[in-house]
Amino acid sequence: MSTETTPPFDPLTAAPELETGSRLLEPVSLQPPLQAEGTFAALRFPNYRLWFYGQLASLVGTWMQTTAQGYLIFQLTHSPAFLGYVGFASGIPTWLFTLFGGVISDRMSRRNLLVITQSSMLLLAFILAGLTFAGAVQPWHIILLAFLLGIANAFDAPARQSFVLEMVNRDHMANAIALNAAMFNMATAVGPAIAGLAYAALGPGWCFTINGISFFAVIIALVMMKLAPFTPVTRKTSAVNELREGLRYVWANQDIRVLILIIGGSGLLGLSMNNLIPAWAVDVLNGDATTNGLLQAARGVGSLVAALMIASFGLRYHRGKMMTLGMFVYPVMMLVFAWARLVPVSLILMVGVGWGFMTLSNLCNSLVQHLVKDELRGRVMGVYTLVFFGLVPIGSLILGWLAQAFSSPAAVAAAGALALVLAAGVLILAPHIRRLNI
């Protein structure tokens, strides 16, 4: 497999390249660096810089809401199963709409699509805040709003994943993906900690309000970007046929197929445990809302460290081997976490879980993005998003039931053991994956 990359794009001397159908591959009016090294290289692109800081502010708010929402529904129901119901409700739209979201992101301006989805999320956050301040919020309200938020995410995620190449050039795409992960996990580290303190001092309503306000940051950033005008592609086939084309492409490409199966299994087993953290903080560690926030933040710290490591390595490391390492680290950390009963030890182990899972998921995303054809990027990332986020709610539901029937530690231990089996299976049956270095 070739590991060549295209020469860095210089907007001062070269014309922008176009994909088939006139979707711009390279951003305009940019002055990128002349090489792809450096932890924060992608931030030298003005459009990506706007995106990074706008999304960072918005994601802090999103994690505040996620943390407060989980603790609120546990307070209302005292049931770990309801934590699984919320995760399941938010994930149902992933199965229903994500593939079509990928088709739409190949057919219309991704910036416009993102403005629409982010505005929808803003509205839903304010509705939940209003219900909470009025003292009228019920568990079914939270579940319904989680479902509606899932619809917005189903169209947002494929566009967001494939939007990277409209803000930076191809040589800096891996760095931008790593910085996206760093941005996400900076928010994961900060948002839950702030939410725990704000929930204890002010109540959940203010966490939801701050989230609603934070969406203005990313919407304003999107509007301010200087992108080339989007030229609609002349389509000779229907959206359903285009969807089938994307599915056939994924299935025919062995490397992409295996990578998507890896991320799906890891999401099912590794990401689903997040929904149990509110119950874990109270029932296992005898803590409160602040403990819940600290556990969520600890995972974010580990993920942030992993993302910054990946960004700083640039083109100098073997992505397949690093991804394989992460695939083994996070289930081992989960298994040890299941037996820990001291808060400081649990926080350290959550850092390890976050590091392992982020190393796996970030490099898996980067490898898929480098392997995929540009004209199929939105559809392939739609499949990636469907498998990754579509299996998380199923895992959340199963882990919620297991925690209710047995215990939260038993549920996490079972998920960690299965994740370890998955890692071993990939290493034995698809050893070529660890040799990928695109």
Image (spheres, helix red, strand yellow):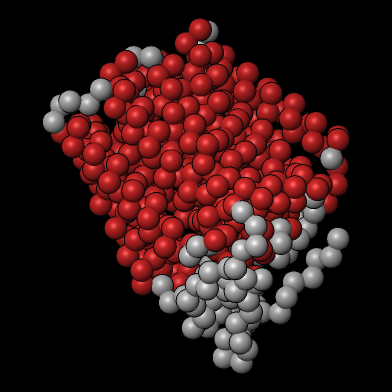
Which quarter of the rendered picture does the N terminus lie within?
A: bottom right
Query: In front here: 88 or 379?
Result: 379
> Which residue is at a point 30% across and 48% down the rendered structure image?
122
Task: Find residue 32 and report its image quarter.
Answer: bottom right
Query: Residue 239, position in %: x, y?
Result: 59, 52
Asked if residue 221 is positioned above or below residue 159 in the image, the reply reads: below
Query: In front here: 258 or 197?
Result: 258
Asked if residue 108 is positioned above or below residue 287 in the image, the reply reads: below
Asked if residue 31 is positioned above or below residue 281 in the image, the reply reads: below
Query: Residue 255, position in %: x, y?
Result: 79, 49
Asked if residue 96 is positioned above or below residue 275 in the image, the reply reads: below
Q: Residue furthest bottom?
A: 13
Answer whether residue 339 is visible to the viewer in this image: no
Query: In front here: 378 or 320?
Result: 378
Answer whether residue 4 is visible to the viewer in this image: yes
> Which residue is at a point 48% across and 48% down the rendered structure image?
155
Left or right of residue 114: residue 432: right
Left or right of residue 136: residue 237: right
Query: Residue 20, position in %: x, y?
Result: 66, 71
Query: Residue 3, position in %: x, y?
Result: 80, 66
> Which residue is at a point 66% across and 33% down the rendered structure image?
265
Left or right of residue 395: residue 135: left
> Which residue is at a point 42% across and 62% down the rendered structure image?
112
Which quarter of the rendered picture does the C terminus lie within?
A: bottom right
Q: Residue furthest top?
A: 405
| Count of picture labels | 0
